[in-house]
Structure formats: C-alpha cells, structure tokens
Image (spheres, rainbow, N blue to C red):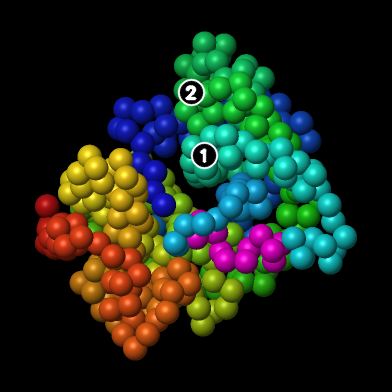
Amino acid sequence: MNYTPSKHSSLARNAGLLAMLVSLAACASAGNPAPDTGSGSVGQNPSALAATWPIKTRHHVDLWLHGFAMLQDDTTLVPYFRRGYKAELLAFKGRSNVTTQLDANTGRLRTRFAQDSRIVNAQFIALYFDSFNEMFESIDLFIRVEGEPRAARDQQTASLIALLANYFPSAADRDWLRLFSQSLRDEDSRFYRSYWDQQQRDRSAVLSSVENLWQNTYRPRMQTFLNNTSQAAGEVLLSLPLNGEGRTLSAGKRQNATAVTYPLRTQDAIEAIYVITHEIVGSLAGTAVNDNVTPNDRQEGRADRYTSSAAVRAGAMLLQKTSPELVDGYARYYLRSANRSIGQNATASLALAFPLPDNIRDAISRQIDVVIGGI
C-alpha cells in the first residue's frame, strides 16, 4: 500500500519536517507516555544506520498499526494485516489476563470506520515520526489547538498541524484521534510494549537474515530500479502486524519509508524481500493503472481492484528481471496471503488470482524495462 505526497504538499516527509518534529518533542505535552528507548529499535544492527535502505524496526510504527489491526475489518484480497493477527493477539492478552482501554473503547472506535472509511489512510501517520514520544506529543499538540494551523506559534508548528489535519479534518475526526491515542497509550503500557520487546528478542536472528539477504544480494540487484524511480534511499521497517500488504510513504529520492512483514523464522526471511519488492513497484503499477482505465472503470470500482492486482503482478515482473529464482516463491507467498490455491504452476495461478487487462499488464512490463534500462 503506497502513499505518495505531492511534491508541494504539507504532507511531504522532508528533512525540515523531521527536524521540526524533533524540536516539538521537547515542548509539546504528551501526558504520560510509556518509556521510549531511543527510536524504539531492539537488537538492531548498528551498521544499519549508515546503510542504503537499512533494515530497521520501530516500536511506535508497530503500535500504531497494531491499533488499526485490532479495530478494522480486513476484507481485501491481500489483507492489510497478517491473517489471524487480531485473534492471536486477543488470545495472548486473554492468557495474560490483560484488558486495556483499547479493548474497552473498541466499539466506539470501530463506529468511526463505518462512518468514514477514509480514516484507514491514517495508518501512514506513524511513518512520519521517528519515535513514540514524537508521534504522541505531536498528536497532543494537534488536538490541543483543535487542528487549527493558525493557532501555531511558528511556521514549522503550523506545518505539523496541517499534516495531521489532512488525515483528521473534522472535529469528529479529532475526537476519534483523541480516544484512539489515549487507548493506544494504555494498550502499550499494559501490554504491547512488553510484547513487542519480547518479539524483537525472539526475532533478532530473523532481522539479521533479512538484512543479509537485502543488503548483500537483492538490494544491489534492484538499485538501478530504485534509483530511476526516485527511491535511491530510504528505510525498510520490519513490522509485526503486517503480511503481504506493506505500507510505503514516498516523498522524494532520499525520503522513503517502507514497512513490511516481519517473518517469524529465519528460514522465512525471504518473505520480507517479497514484500519489499511488492512495495517498491507500487507507484509504477499504480501509474500504469491510472493511465489505462476508463471513467467507467473508476466509477464501478474496477480501477481499485486493478491497482491491488497490479502491484502484486508488477512485483513478479520486477523479480523476473532482477532475481528470477525468486519468482516462484513470490507467487506462492502472495497466493497464500490471498488464501488462493497454488496449483501446479504458481506463476500461472498468480495471474488467475490477480487478473489484469492486457493493456495494463503490458504497460507495467514496458515501464519496468524502461526503468531498468535507464531513464
């Protein structure tokens, strides 16, 4: 799942915005947040800080996505979250005899999804911030000034308020955000932080395996594609709630963030590479769809279905050009994610499960060839 801010949008994730968020962390009130251990990364390889597209983890990103996973219905072909995640976490909390404000407020929070489905886009918010404290202090400030940029003391603060107002424009939206952030803080202090820390310890070898595969083999093979699609640098975040549908925020050649699945076992580390591939072709695939659909396609919802299928199929096409040995595994992974039969030929089954009109398929293939060949 991709979000690409306009070049001139207040949502642009640029260096100035990030510097502003750091400065705001010192002056905005956050109530009583859970202790924040730096960036919220446990067991992370220090060398990742200097790498191109380093592999990282972020506690606040996982917490934010966890909140959405526990609230929203997940009916997409490639699920927004790992299948069974909600049931698994509820069972874990039940065994631990833990109940939080997120549990108590689930009904009220879910109601807002039914009233305005656009709120699902707020899943991307965590990718703008570097830590738990930065994110929640910024949310507190936004709520305190009632989402009004003109109430800010300076232009940087006004830009931050405008950023959040794009996702939460109305008073009802801000009320939802207030309750959601309050509930998440309680969820974190009573349960999620300790759960997350334990998962990082348990999966530290997985992170190392993903980093080795990505930095030593597959990123170098894809770097030309990344360079020529304004994705020369960024960061990859392994995220516990995610599966085949990642979250990508693209805002320029060197300001990209992609959250992808965090495999459970070292032997499954390649799954993270599959999802990275799916995410980095998302914008190209979306453009191919937009350029080749009719107004009727948009009105009747076919364009949205094509966009989802296009990202999956484009990932397979990119791997065919850069790492053909991964295509079969990629196809099997996305068929399992979509709960579809693999059959005797996984690649053929992928085409059946994620159908595309020939003109869109061919447009994606041509554009990948152009990008890899150099622009």
Residue 137 spot, x, y in % from top left:
65, 31
Q: Secondary structure at mark 1?
A: helix
Residue at the image position 20 percent from the left and 60 percent from the top: 357
Instruction: Tally the numbered discs.
Output: 2
Task: Give the residue at mark 2.
Answer: 162
- The residues bearing labels 1 and 2 have C-alpha atoms spaced at a distance of 20 Å
Residue at the image position 37 percent from the left and 75 percent from the top: 330
| Region of the chain picked out in magenta, as a range | 79-89
336 to the left or right of 25: left
Mark 1 or mark 2: name the one nearer the start of the chain.
1
Residue 321 spot, x, y in % from top left:
20, 72
Q: Secondary structure at mark 2?
A: helix
Residue 335 spot, x, y in % from top left:
41, 73
Q: Residue furthest bottom?
A: 344
- Residue 20 marker: none
Residue 85 counted in the magenta span: yes
In this view of the protein, can residue 160 be seen by the observer? Answer: no
Task: Give the residue at mark 1.
Answer: 117
Disc 2 packing (10 Å; few <14; some 14–19; many ≥20): many
Residue 27 spot, x, y in % from top left:
66, 24
